[in-house]
Image (cartoon, rainbow, N blue to C red):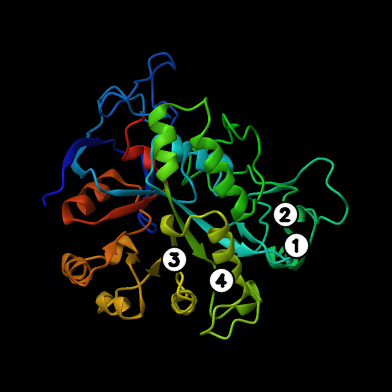
Amino acid sequence: MKRQRRRTKLLPTTTRSSTDKTTTLSNEPAGGSTAGRLVCVFAALLLTVGACTGSETPPEIVEADVPETLDVQGHRGARGLRPENTLAAFEIALDLGVTTLELDLHFSADGVPVVWHDPIVDPSKCRLADGAPSRVPDPETADSADLGVRRLTAEQLGWYVCDRNPDPGRFPDQMAIPGELPGADFRIIPLAELFAFVEAYAASDLKSDPQREAASQVHFNIETKRVPAEPETIDDGFDGSTAGPFELAILAVVAAAGLDERVVVQSFDHRSLRAVAATGATVQLAPLTRDRVNDPAAYVEWGADIWSPSASTLTAELLASAQAAGLAVVPWTVNDPADMAALIDLGVDGIITDRPDLLLERP
């Protein structure tokens, strides 16, 4: 059956990194008064979050036929708009209507899967909350070894306020604005708390009917942050084949929330995914790849459902091979509208992006 398509205008950007395919919009006017700033709209309802440059010459707009079935994944929530992996980032992604929340998982000292990307509490992203007990190391003064996520309990991790932008050059529109539901809560949270937050969002009178409906069906793409060369990062005795305490804890949280059918587990460490597959869990599995892959169809043999390559390595031939084998193809991390349009025309099944606002109309 032919997929339905919607004509969408992808707004251009003012800054771009050629090394990581990161694209951002600037909320600073290039000229003229603040009052004279243009308000950009795609499909007349786009969230206006600094989408225009304020220049006298209207910027070129990229148009793309976007499939209704395109899986729009908010990377680390919506890292281009709010501090990554925080409730505020997930809320704005839900506000925009993403179909999947993408996030990262580490393992706390007390065996809790927590939503965080880095192996440490990075002082460029986090600060210590006022009133924190002395047993919680201060990122500004503590040795990095003492700030390892695996060395801190979930309760200790909850004392960090992660509202800092470590790279404003790449993410000039990332703002630590309190969310409508979470307020100024920028903690490192357990995975179970994110699931509870999305459930509360889907029932909140503060959100529109379309927003609540979308949140009630949103999927979760959760990345296990195992690194084969750095086993101390997770440090749970993983033997490379049998699911370790980390994977089992994740699956237990997913099962307790009743979200098996809405969760994808992804990883660059494909051993972790094979171990999950061996448990018989019904979650979907997505190998992540950085380099060019010769035969992505081979992932199907051990139970993969999705292939997520670096967008810069994806070709039409590889896409066709993967899809013919039954894999959905969802490249990462794509923030440039021209790149989005090219990938959509190529026929990808989804896009992982820091800027879901560039793909979605506001509900």
With 3 as the anchor, is 106 left or right in this view? Answer: right
Amino acid at pointer 3: Gln
Distance Cα–Cα, label 2 vs label 4? 20 Å
Q: Position of residue 267 (x, y in %)?
A: 46, 69
* Cα gap from disc 2 to disc 3, whole angstroms: 23 Å
Q: Nearer the viewer, mark 3 or mark 4?
A: 4
Q: Nearer the viewer, residue 172 or 216?
A: 216
Q: Earlier in the sequence, mark 1 or mark 2?
A: 1
Measured as percent of width and height from the top left, residue 198 is found at 52, 42
Question: How busy is the neighbourhood of tag 2: few (under 14 within 10 Å), some, or many (20 plus)?
Answer: many
Compare marks 3 and 4 and give the one earlier in the sequence.
4
Q: CA distance from mark 1 to mark 2?
A: 6 Å
Q: Which mark is residue 157?
A: 2
Q: Nearer the viewer, residue 252 or 350?
A: 252
Residue drawn at the location 67% of the way across and 62% of the way down: 112
Q: Which residue is mark 1?
A: 152
| Residue 166 makes an appearance in the image | no
Q: Is residue 200 above or below residue 28?
A: below
Distance (Cα) linking label 1 and label 4: 19 Å
Instruction: Point out residue 147 in the picture as x, y percentages from the top left corner.
Output: 73, 62
What residue is shown with label 4?
Answer: 247
What residue appears at the point 11 percent right and 50 percent down from the top-left corner?
2
Q: Are marks 1 and 2 in contact (CB under 8 Å)?
A: yes
